[in-house]
Image (cartoon, rainbow, N blue to C red):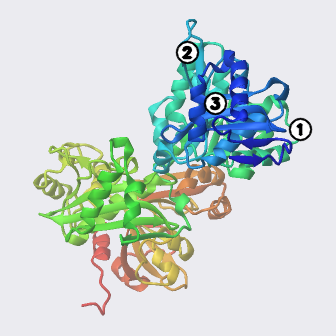
Amino acid sequence: MSAQSDNLPDIELVAPPRGSDALREVIRLGRSAKATVGFLPDAAFEQRTTQRTLLAATIEDRVVAYVLYDLPRDEIRIVQLVVAKPHQGRGLARLLVDAIADAHPNRRGIVLRCRDDFPATTLWEKLDFHPVSAKAGRSLDGKLLTRWFRSFGQPDLFTFLHEQDTRPLAVLDASTFFDVVEGTKRHAEQLRADWIGEHARLGVADHILHEIHRGDDPDRKARQRQATEPLRLASDSTNGWKEVRAVIDGAHPDAPPTDNDDLIHLAQAIAANATWVVTGDRRFIARYGRTAERIGSTAIVTPQQFLLELDETARDDQYRPAELAGTDVTRRAVDATTLPGLAPSFVNHRLGDRIRGLRDEIDDLAVHPDARLEVIEVAGELRGLACWVVTGGSLDVLLARVTSGVAETTIGRHLLAMMRDEAVGAEVEVVRVLDERPSRAVESSFRDEGFALNDRDEIVAHPLTGRGTLGELHALATRLNSPMVDDGLFAPTGNDLVHRAALAERWFAPFVVLGAGLPTYYVPIRHGWATDLVDVGLAAGQLLPRPWRLGLRRELVYYRSPLNSRGIAAPARLVWYVSGDEPGAGNVRGVSHLTDVVVDEPKRLYQRFRALGVWTEQDVVKAAGKGPTAMALRFTATRRLGPVPLKDYENLMAPAAVMLQSVHPIDEHTFVRILDYRPPHAS
């Protein structure tokens, strides 16, 4: 090997041949540095010439530096790196290290060991090495040897794991990481809580290893290094961080040198596509926060801000359909092009799932003659996977998976609602979730969508058709061995009959409970809002709704003036009349369950319910009219009715006289007639 350095034009890199003067000079230089690099016999140098793992730097044919290395497994291991004292500080060490890196680019990286008390220990960071571990050396005094590693950015185990992990990444800066490890601050315990991992992946950038290495306490350093292992980012995830750092430096030419470590953390986090960088340094946040958001959409936040934001996600993602408003949501059968990507996307590591096992299971189900295998896509991204088979009087859900991320629980609820609808269409009364590793978003939605654990340890739901009294529903539920039989829902006495009837309709939907006094209200809604909230088919002027359009919606909110509301209160049913002259308007089109009614100032209502709807704050203010308050109607489980034209609705209401442009109650007899309505020309 022979090469000329562009940066050091008087330096030539050569591979000394066996028995050459250059080799003898290398051996002499090694002898002069044996106090720090150790002693090697001449035969060791000669062997490396044969293996071509000895590289020397020469000036006018005189050796001034060399690197001797081995090639074990998939690494380059430096045994000795020596630069003659008169030539130190000229960049020869980097020149040699870069040269052997260029000669072996397919290796994972370069590794070496160096005593912490040797002067060279300050060199390795400058050459892009990271201190990854330390142990006592073999000398009598047991001085610590640090293992340094320079990664080539090749994919590794962390790459594989992180590619399967769709949780947003939060990178801890050094001070926050040390707080977590040492438990020195109140937020440290909170950051170690199990629930954090359900919503975000905590990580540390490689630069943390340098800050650990600078510590004085060997036991503490060992403890801190060990704590980095589950948090380390993949080797290839921070490729390009130096370019990011250059952009940051360009935006902040006056950045003080004391910010250097934190800026490296920030650049590596941005390169890794982190959602957050967590730091306790508010000055750093104020100075660099906007730059981080501009470069990589990375938010620099305090631990307290991070915890609050994640807690809001944990709470609000119980249902956030607004995050999917306006997105292209599709449900379709799995095809050959989609099949290979399903296992990596939907593997549930949390419950011990493995990609290979899940892939085999999906492949078997894809060719099962009776199984249906479908995906839910949001803006072209795989977000939901369901597989089911109808057999023996039940619909068995074999896979119920949702990827983590924005609105995951929203999608989880819809996946379960989809299974209930499929069961109704198949005319079976039992849905069983047999997936042993359902996604967290699905598990957390069981109760909201009418699923519960029965006495056979099965998660089941019972979507029942028809109508009847609460007692008649009780008989059906008992026959099916429903877990709700012993849940107090069918208690023969109590003053909460209306509430229990409303709950029963939701648990056993689409069954309609009669004779319990559950009120029903007619509510007019403008065509534009009906398009988004009640019947998405109106968007195209269709009489039948288009499936899976305009986002996923189970719970929503509608605003109106509290005037002329006729004492509307939850629980109740809402029968929607779509007003206007647009195609599809002028009809009763749907029925929903009213779960909450709140009257308040428009701004406060908007802040409270903004996650549930498509309304802007200005829309809510407009809905209030001239009054100081607006009314929010929160509703769920909307299903289609009719459509029932306005004239036919008036006939169904006769002889009662009603104001068709305002809220009014509907008696139970009329509600049943609406349910049974068929247009005159229908057979």
Dot 3, how many residues are within 10 Å of its Cα: few (below 14), some (14-19), or many (20+)? many
In the rendered image, which residue does mark 2 sit on?
137
Total numbered circles? 3
Q: Amino acid at mark 3?
A: Ile
In the rendered image, which residue does mark 1 sit on?
254
Assess whether mark 1 and mark 3 are in contact (beta carbons under 8 angstroms): no
Residue nearest the observer in this picture, 23 or 228: 23
Residues under labels 2 and 3: Cα distance? 23 Å
Give the answer, above or below, for where 474 lies relative to 10. below
Q: Amino acid at mark 1?
A: Asp
User: Which percent across, then down, holds residue 625?
Assistant: 65, 64
Residue nearest the observer in this picture, 1 or 493: 1
The residue lying at 84 percent from left, 45 percent from top is 7
Q: Is residue 405 left or right of residue 356?
A: right
Give the answer, above or below, for where 533 lies relative to 215. below
Q: Is residue 291 left or right of residue 583?
A: right
